Image (spheres, rainbow, N blue to C red):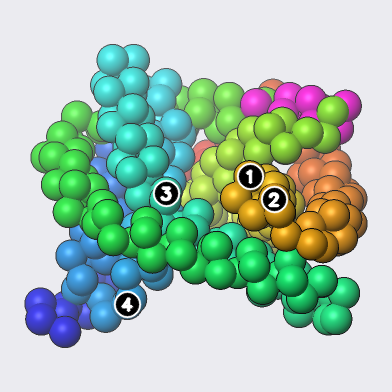
Amino acid sequence: MTGLRLATRSDAEDRAYRLRAAESVGEGVARVARGRIDNALDELRGRTGRGTVEAIHESRKDVKKLRALLRLVRGGLPEATFRTENVALRDIGRGLSGVRDADVMLATLDGLEERYPGELPPDAAGGLRQALEANRRSVRSRGSEGTAAQALADVRVRVESWVPSARGFDDVAGGLRRTYRDGRRAQAAATSDPSTELLHDWRKRVKDHWYHLTLLREAWPNLLSPLAGAAHDLSDALGDEHDLGVLTAYAREHVSGLDGLDELAALTSRRQRELRSDAFGLGARLYADRPRDFTRRMGTLWIVWRPGE
C-alpha cells in the first residue's frame, strides 16, 4: 500500500497509553495525547495496512481514549480548554461513527446466528443482511476519513495547552472521582430502569473508568490491570447489549415487511437480558466503593508510586 508505515517498537513505547513515574503529569499527558492522535492519523491516512472499516474503528477508539484522558486531567485545565477540546473530539468521533455502526450491525447479526444456530428465521435474517450490506456500502462511499484526519491534526497542534498544572495527584484526583461517581450513578439509574438509553449512558462512563485505570496501571499493575480488565468486560457486555438494540431498531425501521422479524426481536431480547444480568453482576463488584474511598485508595497508590508529589 502506498504510504504504508508500520510503527516501530520505539514508536509503540512513546505512544503507550499509560502515565509513567519518570515523567511529570504534564509530560505524560502531552506524550499520550500525541501518541493517540498519531495512531489515529496513521490509521486514517492508510499507513497501517488495515482495511478502511478496521482503520476507522481503531481511530475511533483512539478518539475515545483522548476524551478519557481529557476527563482525567480536567481539574488541572482551564474549563474553556477542556470544553473546546472535548467538543472537537466528540465531533470527530461522530463523523466516523457511520462506518463503524454499519459494520457492527452486520457483526451483531453474525453473532446472533452463531449463538442461536437455526433459530433465526431465514427470510428475516437474509433480508436484514441484504439491507445492512447495502447500508454499509452507502456509508463507506461517503469517505469521512480525510475530514477527520484534518480535524485531528488541528487538535494535535493544541495538545500543549492540555498540560495541567504540576500538582501531582491533584491533577488527576478530580477526574478519577468524577468519572467513578458518574459511573455509580449511571449504574443505579440503569438498574432502576434498564432502558437502552440509560444502559448506553452507563457504558460511556464505564469506558472512561476503564481508560483511567489503564492510564494509571503502572501505580500497581497487579491490582489495577485486573480492575481495568473487569471494566473492559463490563464495557463489552453493555456494548453488545446496545448493539443488539440498534440492530432491532434498524430492522423495524428499514425491513419491517419481512416475515420473521418478531422471532428475531425475541432472540435479541433474550440475549440482551443475559448481557444485562452479566453487566449488573460485574458492575456491583467494580463500583463497590464509595467515590471518596476509591479516590483515597488511588491517592495512596500514587504516593507510593510517585513519592514527593
State the residue at coordinates (27%, 66%).
Answer: 43
Disc 1 and disc 4: Cα gap in Å?
32 Å
State the residue at coordinates (19%, 42%).
Answer: 151
Instruction: Look at mark 4 in the image and give the residue it sits on.
Output: 50
Instruction: Look at mark 2 in the image and give the residue it sits on.
Output: 256
In the picture as drawn, the residue positioned furthest to the front comes out as: 257
Disc 1 and disc 3: Cα gap in Å?
19 Å
State the residue at coordinates (60%, 69%).
Answer: 129
In the picture as drawn, the residue positioned furthest to the bottom comes out as: 1
Look at the numbered disc 2 and give the secondary structure of its residue.
loop
In the rendered image, which quarter contains the N terminus? Answer: bottom left
The nearer-to-camera label among 2 and 3 is 2
Q: Amino acid at mark 4?
A: Arg
- Dot 3 or dot 4, earlier in sequence: 4
Q: Nearer the viewer, residue 42 or 147?
A: 147
Main secondary structure type of the part rendered in magenta: helix
Instruction: Look at mark 1 in the image and give the residue it sits on.
Output: 253
Look at the numbered disc 3 and give the secondary structure of its residue.
helix
Discs 1, 2 touching: Cβ within 8 Å? yes
- Residue 171: percent from left, percent from top: 41, 28
What's drawn in magenta, residue-wise? Answer: 182-192
